[in-house]
Amino acid sequence: MEKILVINKINNGAYSSGETLSGIKVMIKCGYLKDTKKFEAIILEERDSFILCAIPEIYENERVINGFRNDEGLLFSRDLDLTSHCNVYRVQDKFGFIHPSIRNINLYLRNNLELWKNSRLRLTSGGPWHISSARLYGLTFEKALSKLHSRGIQKARFYCEDLQDFSQQGVIAEMLVNLTKDEDGIVSIEVWQGVKNTPQVYYIHGIMDENEKYFTHFDGAKIAFSIDEMEMLFMQDTKIKGGEYNKMFRVDGIISKNQVFEMANQYLPLDNIIDEYFEIKAL
C-alpha cells in the first residue's frame, strides 16, 4: 500500500482532481470527504497522464464495515459516527456510505432521536445513484384497516397512472399491499413495490400494537425476483419468498402511523403512491 502526498483542488462528485507536490496530476476517489486540501492518499493505479488514488478512509472500508454487520446485514446506529456529510458515517477509522435506497430514511431517522437510537441501517463502501419516481393510485390504509376487522386480510394492488410513459420503456410500475391480522389480533402490513421486467422489488414490513394506535416495528428490504415470480406476485396476488433478500433498515419501538408513512415515502422509489395510500401529507 503506497501513499503519496496530494493537494486536492477541484471536487467533482466521486473523484476530485489535484496534483502531487511535484506537479503530477492525480484523480482522488472520494477526495471531497477530506477536510484539508493537503493529505496522504493511497495509490490505486499509475496511468500515462495521471495517478489514480483514494483517501485512506475508504481503502478496504468494506472489510471494516462487514465486521459490524449483524445477521441481517445492517449496522446499529450506535456504531456510526456522524461526519459533515449527511450520508457518510465513520466506522472506526473508515468511511461508510448509506445505501442509496435509504438516503432519505437516514435523514429522517437522524432528525428523530428516539427512532435513531433503535435503528439499524445498511452501509456500503461506495456512493449513491439516482432513483426515479412515478405516480400511482389505489385503496387507502385507513379503509383497509377498517375492513380488516371482518375479513382478516385486506389486499390492494396499484398501477402507474401514466402507463404510456412506462410502456415505451417496456416496463410497468406496480405495488402490492397486504394488511393482515393474525390469530392473536396483531396487525401487520407488507408492501412490495417494483417495476416489471426488473430483477429487484422494494419491500417494507410493519407491525402494529394490539390497539392499532401505532407501530412497534418497521423495516425495509430489497428482494430479487425472476420475471415469472414478478408475474405471480403482482398479477396473481400470490405471496412468494423470492430470491436474494437484503435488509436495508430496521426500526423498533413506538413509531407513529405518520412516521411509518414518512419513512415509507422516503424509502420506496415510487413515492407519490404512499401519499395516496396513507392519506397523510408529509411534514
Image (cartoon, helix red, strand yellow):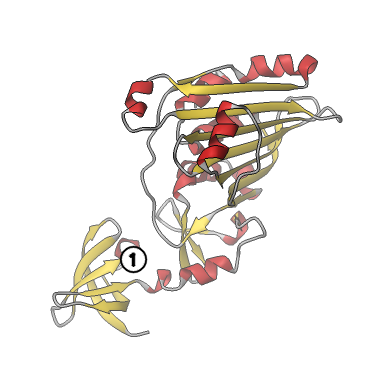
Can you see residue 281? no
Is 27 displayed left or right of 220 in the figure? left
Viewer-proximal residue among 197 and 260:
197
For the point 36% across and 44% down, which residue is it?
A: 130
Q: Is residue 244 left or right of residue 136?
A: right
Question: Is residue 146 found left or right of 237 in the rendered image?
Answer: right
**Residue 240 location in percent, x, y?**
65, 39
Report the residue at 45% width, 25% height from top: 272
Q: Which residue is mark 1?
A: 34
User: In the displayed image of the protein, which residue is found farthest to the right?
Assistant: 184
Name the residue at the front extreme.
228
Residue 90 versus residue 166 in the image, above or below: below
The N terminus lies in quadrant: bottom left
Q: Whole-percent x and y of residue 143?
A: 65, 14
In terms of secondary structure, where does tag 1 sit? Answer: loop
Q: Position of residue 141 (x, y in %)?
A: 62, 20
Quadrant of the image occupied by residue 53: bottom left
Amino acid at pointer 1: Lys
